[in-house]
Amino acid sequence: MNHSSWKWHWCLWPMLAVALACGAGTTAQQVRILDLPQFICPSSTPRPTHTALPTQVQPPIYIPPSGYATFTPVPGCLWNGRVCATNTPASGGLYQQPGYTLTGAISTPRPTFTPWPTPTPLVTTGPFHLGADVYTGGFASAVSLRLRIESVAVIPFSADRQIVTWGIELENIGTVSYVTIPGGQVFVAALRTSASERAGQWWASAEAARAAAIPPESRISDALTVAPDETYRFTLAAYTPLGEPLRLGWALDPLSGGQDHHLTGGNVAYWSVAAQTECVGNLGSDAVIPTLQRLIPTATPTARPTFPPWCVWCP
């Protein structure tokens, strides 16, 4: 992990503390997300009723052919000057009225089966697929958010390092403003190297963004206030060892003082880079969000982080 990434991450906590102390009315409730992150699989709209076939009360009726006409004299036929017609088939002629079937009478009105039940949404708490809209907050937390990670890419950099880029989308769907540092809360959490799968915390940095030719965006590294109904989209970049990105994490409660998978903070949502086939797609901007689970993540042991010796400004 390069020093720029470390500095960005370890300075997150004091920067948020400054935001709380100096921000206009900013409170810890605007920073912390305590509710479980959840993805709601879109369900297809069922038919309002399952209509049965009409009940048939009479069998089909077969009407035989009639009016056999022939151009040759047939004993007993009625001659009309051109042909004679008879009900007795004979070679060299045809029926003027072919046989046909009448559908039997049916009951009225048509009966219906019991209506289909309302679909039950499939809700998962991670890992989420890229592009998934993840909802969190609104119960134990004052703020309510929609989060998304997508478009993960790898850019070669050196013999032992690469740059991983990804996009994030953050929408405040609640009524309370949310305060965050986008570049200091989302990170690469796992890589598949040539030897094995490797877990870690590779944080975004301005240096990696410049190397990846990503336009500078100051709001990525500053305390950002997201007002209700506001949406922000950013592209982040991080230096990592060589390997295939497997997971990305989003620290939702940076002020918890605890640890989640050796990460200082708590309540971390994870996105999987691997393709997901069980359920993809999103509810859409105009969809009604079902009631989310009210569960709160299990508390993790409190542990003070060990700061690198060169970080003289870390608490």
Image (spheres, helix red, strand yellow):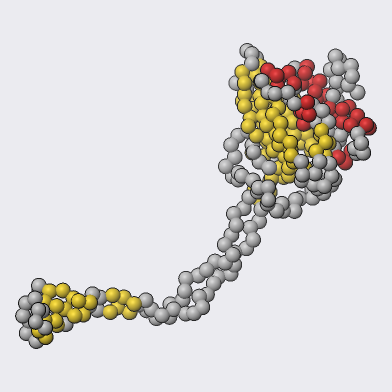
Residue at position x 44%, y 78% from top? 106
Which quarter of the picture shows residue 26? top right
Confirm whether residue 197 shows in the render.
no
Residue 277 left/right relative to 232:
left
Q: Is residue 30 above or below residue 18?
A: below
Which quarter of the picture shows residue 63? bottom left
Residue 71 left/right relative to 195:
left
Q: Position of residue 267 (x, y in %)?
A: 79, 38
Near-viewer residue (242 or 95): 95
Residue at position x 73%, y 23% from top? 216
Q: Residue furthest top?
A: 159
Near-viewer residue (168 or 10): 168
Q: Residue furthest right?
A: 21
Residue at position x 57%, y 42% from top? 277
Residue 166 left/right relative to 49:
right
The quarter of the image holding the N terminus is: top right
Q: Residue furthest front?
A: 81
Near-viewer residue (250 or 243): 250
Q: Position of residue 181 (x, y in %)?
A: 80, 31
The quarter of the image holding the C terminus is: top right
Q: Position of residue 311 (x, y in %)?
A: 86, 17
Q: Is residue 41 above or below residue 46?
A: above
Confirm whether residue 139 shows in the render.
yes
Q: Is residue 33 above or below residue 306?
A: below
Q: Is residue 47 above or below residue 139?
A: below
Which quarter of the picture shows residue 186? top right
Tally of marks: 0
Residue at position x 46%, y 76% from top? 55
